[in-house]
Image (spheres, rainbow, N blue to C red):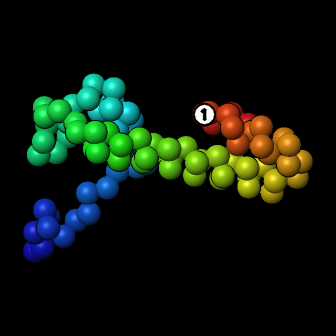
């Protein structure tokens, strides 16, 4: 039987990870993993900011292309892509 700790990837759904990263950035403290309770360095806070920005960019592009595929104009698609949440 394979060792679970070494052969399984630690991955979470992006929205769940983003929620954790946002919380860590707000509190400026590690909340998961081996550094729990230690203060975030500027570098680590920057990594979390970058991850959160990338998730936002990805979601916006997905919404834009989806709206264009539904026959909406470029202006309508742009407006939809900038909304936060699941609303169109």
Which is nearer the eye, 53 or 77? 53
Answer with the quarter of the image where residue 22 lies: top left
**Residue drawn at (80%, 45%) of the image:** 77
**Residue drawn at (45%, 42%) of the image:** 52
Label 1 environment density (alpha carbons within 10 Å; few <14, some 14–19, many ≥20): few
Residue under circle 1?
Answer: 85
The answer to whether residue 69 is visible is yes
* Above-or-below relation of 63 to 30: below
**Residue at disc 1, secondary structure:** loop
Task: Give the percent coordinates (x, y) of residue 19.
Answer: 39, 35
* Above-or-below relation of 60 to 6: above
Which image quadrant: the C terminus?
top right
Task: Give the percent coordinates (x, y) of residue 21.
Answer: 34, 38
**Residue drawn at (55%, 43%) of the image:** 56
Answer with the quarter of the image where residue 75 lies: top right
Task: Give the percent coordinates (x, y) of residue 4.
Answer: 14, 64
Task: Give the percent coordinates (x, y) of residue 28.
Answer: 26, 29
């Amino acid at each position: 039987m394979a060792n679970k700790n070494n052969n399984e990837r630690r991955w979470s759904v992006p929205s769940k990870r983003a929620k954790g990263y946002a919380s860590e950035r707000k509190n400026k403290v590690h909340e998961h993993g081996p550094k729990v309770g230690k203060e975030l360095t500027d570098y680590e806070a920057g990594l979390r900011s970058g991850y959160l920005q990338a998730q936002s960019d990805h979601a916006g592009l997905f919404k834009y292309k989806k709206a264009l595929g539904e026959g909406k104009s470029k202006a309508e698609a742009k407006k939809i892509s900038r909304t936060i949440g699941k609303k169109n």
